[in-house]
Image (spheres, helix red, strand yellow):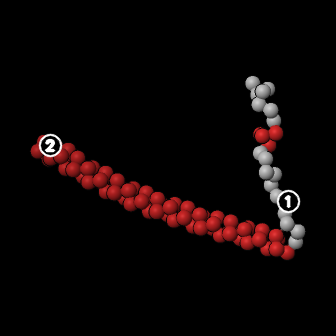
Amino acid sequence: MDAQDSEDPKQSTADMTTFVQNLLQQMQARFQTMSESIVTKIDEMGARINELEQSINDLRAEMGAEGSPSPLAPSKKPDEDKPEEGSA
């Protein structure tokens, strides 16, 4: 039995190494799949946001053409109206 016991730790270590390597490969494959899925979803969300922005711009253009023009933004920034002397 001593001869088998001396072989078992070597075989057990080799088996454990193989098991861990396989486990790490599986984990890497799963992370890669998840990463690709996340990137795909982010790309889809970006495209949807772009479409939404375009729709908003189209609606603004329609509203501007149909009704009175929307009020223009003030030419001065609000910060320009305040004196700089009392800023401390």
Residue shown at the point (52%, 60%) measured from the top left:
38
Residue type, numbered disc 2? Ser
Q: Is residue 1 visible?
A: no
Residue shown at the point (82%, 74%) measured from the top left:
65
Which of the marked residues, 2 or 1, is nearer the chain's N terminus?
2
Image disc number at residue 4: none
Q: Is residue 26 above or below residue 10?
A: below
Q: Residue furthest right?
A: 68
Of 11 and 68, the residue lying toward us:
68
Q: Position of residue 70 (x, y in %)?
A: 84, 63
Disc 2 packing (10 Å; few <14; some 14–19; many ≥20)? few
In the displayed structure, does residue 19 sit left or right of residue 46?
left
Q: Quadrant of the C terminus?
A: top right
Classify mark 2: helix, strand or loop.
helix
Q: Is residue 15 visible?
A: yes
Quadrant of residue 54 within the rendered picture? bottom right
Q: Quadrant of the N terminus?
A: top left
Residue shown at the point (79%, 47%) measured from the top left:
76
Residue shown at the point (20%, 44%) measured from the top left:
9
Q: Position of residue 42 (x, y in %)?
A: 55, 61
Of 27 and 8, the residue lying toward us:
27
Classify mark 1: helix, strand or loop.
loop
Q: Position of residue 11 (x, y in %)?
A: 19, 50
Q: Position of residue 63 (x, y in %)?
A: 82, 71
Q: Nearer the viewer, mark 2 or mark 1?
A: 1
Which residue in the protein does label 2 denote? Answer: 6
Which residue in the protein does label 1 denote? Answer: 71
